[in-house]
Amino acid sequence: MCGILGLLLANEDEFVNQLIFDGLTVLQHRGQDAAGIVTSQRGRLHLRKDNGLVKDVFQRHHMMELTGNVGLGHVRYPTAGSSSCAEAQPLYTNYPYGICVAHNGNLTNTVELAKELRQRNLRHVNTDSDSELLLNVFAEGLTDSTSNTPEPSQSGGQSMEMVDNIFRAVTQVMEKCKGGYAGMYLINGIGIVGFRDPNGIRPIVFGSRPAKKASSSTSSSLAVPATPKKMEKASGTLDYVMASESVAIDTLGFELVRDIKAGEAIFIDFHGNCHARQCHINNSFSPCIFEYVYFARPDSIMDGVSVYETRLLMGEKLAYKIMKNHPEHDIDVVIPIPDTSRTSALQAAYVLGRPFREGYIKNRYIARTFIMPGQATRKKSVRLKLNTIKSEFAGRNVLLVDDSVVRGTTAGEIVQMARDAGALKVYFASAAPAIRYPNIYGIDIPTRNELIAYERNEKEIAAKIGCDWIEYQDCHDLEEAVRSISDPERPLTTFDTSCFTGIYVTGEKIGDEYFGRLHQLRNDSAQESRRNGVAVPSSESEAPEETITSSGGDEGCESMHNDKRDVVTDAQKGCEAI
């Protein structure tokens, strides 16, 4: 799972670097493995990316180099490929025009795409990242579309022929690339493109604001049009932003216009004109429901639905199920597992008629354990991340509420901490259904044998994590919690619930060859091998003739060509596009 952000400011003398930095900081919860920013200033691209948090990757001297009024940003947690900084985004290819990509999600037909790009299109694929495939498929499509097109316009906006070519290239991406994805392309000297997969699995939103006048720091009095269609002739009067979540748009002072639709692309040219087009028709709009459960911030709005309000309903429905299955329960207190479950736990306590208490205090300087690489790292980090307030547990029967239970590592440690603090009985409730299947659309929910609910019932799961009983949300109730809040004019009827049901909206079936490759690539031991520089081929037939491993502590990173200091320490090194 990743966070993406794209900005285009009407005033060429303004810089997007600080806005992108601030926006990525707001989206940091979506990935803490790596971060990157690319900007464009009058035809010159400036790139900085590396492993680490946003605040660590971008120092003052980096920000000074990231000049330009257009740019993309990315925070990454790797679910495909490796965690080398070579795969940090944005990624870049120089032909045609110079194109960069920032992508969130996962492609499921990477082997076929890579083979076609290498053998048919003679394109070199340098990494295992599916984002590089998205980049090259689009570049190839744009090359085909623009072979007889004049040079891009330098004034007044792009010709409709160029606009059509860009949308044709996006259409080709959607026809060829299978999976769940949302992304942005920066086409140097032409514009930025935001797009969403035909099923709308991964989220992306679009916003705008009146542009600041070149001669002053104040914005114009022009109102933001209600739809992209009304922005086609904006011509420098509006600034634009696209992001994974609306919270980034709010924080940066933009106005949320709407979500990009499933199978839709929005193109904003460098002159500030906005174009939207449906590039792929699909009747199965199925946004990922796990965004509402865990990934999204509660103050975000996705597809017209407040994440906070859905979590309130999740807690309410979970409480009713507990009362149905345990009518004589002896719960004394309801305690959330910080932070994501707090909203659901608060409402569950209200419905159950029991006090809500904070029993775990979180160290906010530890990354989210669910998206931390490696089982041993996750287990160790639980006690570093949380500490108990013993008075809330001593002599009480406690109900612990979490947003979900994936591997059970965190849940088992948390239950033991409650017992160590003096709890008489420990009950556990999950605001999400039991996760029994891997996620293949960009969330690091691993192969089945690493999931605690795989081939176990609730009683066995409770014994495994050490609680007295466990209750899971029903999948129907979870869907209804989101569906009931959606806009009647844009109702949400279906969702991607594959990690709960094993039904994949793009047609994959458990037992397919794809899941075998997925297990080889994404199990904990494989990820640990990659972190240690050992190549992990996805199958024997794909094993490379020559394995390239990193040497030294910089994992193949080179100092940026625009870093002009005489001495660059290892900690300050960045990555080239290749």
Image: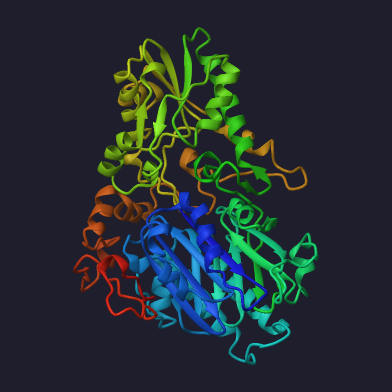
Percent from the top left, x then y, of residue 488?
76, 42
> Could you say which quadrant of the image residue 365 lies in?
top left
Q: In this view, does 531 lie to the left or right of 504?
A: left
Q: Looking at this rendering, what residue extends furthest in the top direction?
A: 328
Q: In this view, does 45 lie above or below 399?
A: below
Q: In this view, does 133 lie to the left or right of 144?
A: left
Percent from the top left, x then y, of residue 177?
51, 65
Q: Is residue 324 above or below residue 275?
A: above
Closest to the observer, 208 or 87: 208
Residue 555 visible somewhere in the drawing: no
Closest to the observer, 551 or 491: 551
Q: In which quarter of the image is the C terminus?
A: bottom left
Percent from the top left, x then y, of residue 536?
25, 60
Q: In this view, does 268 lie above or below 463?
A: below
Residue 255 visible somewhere in the drawing: yes
Q: Residue at x 55, y 74 (%)?
A: 186
Q: In this view, does 431 lie above or below 58?
A: above
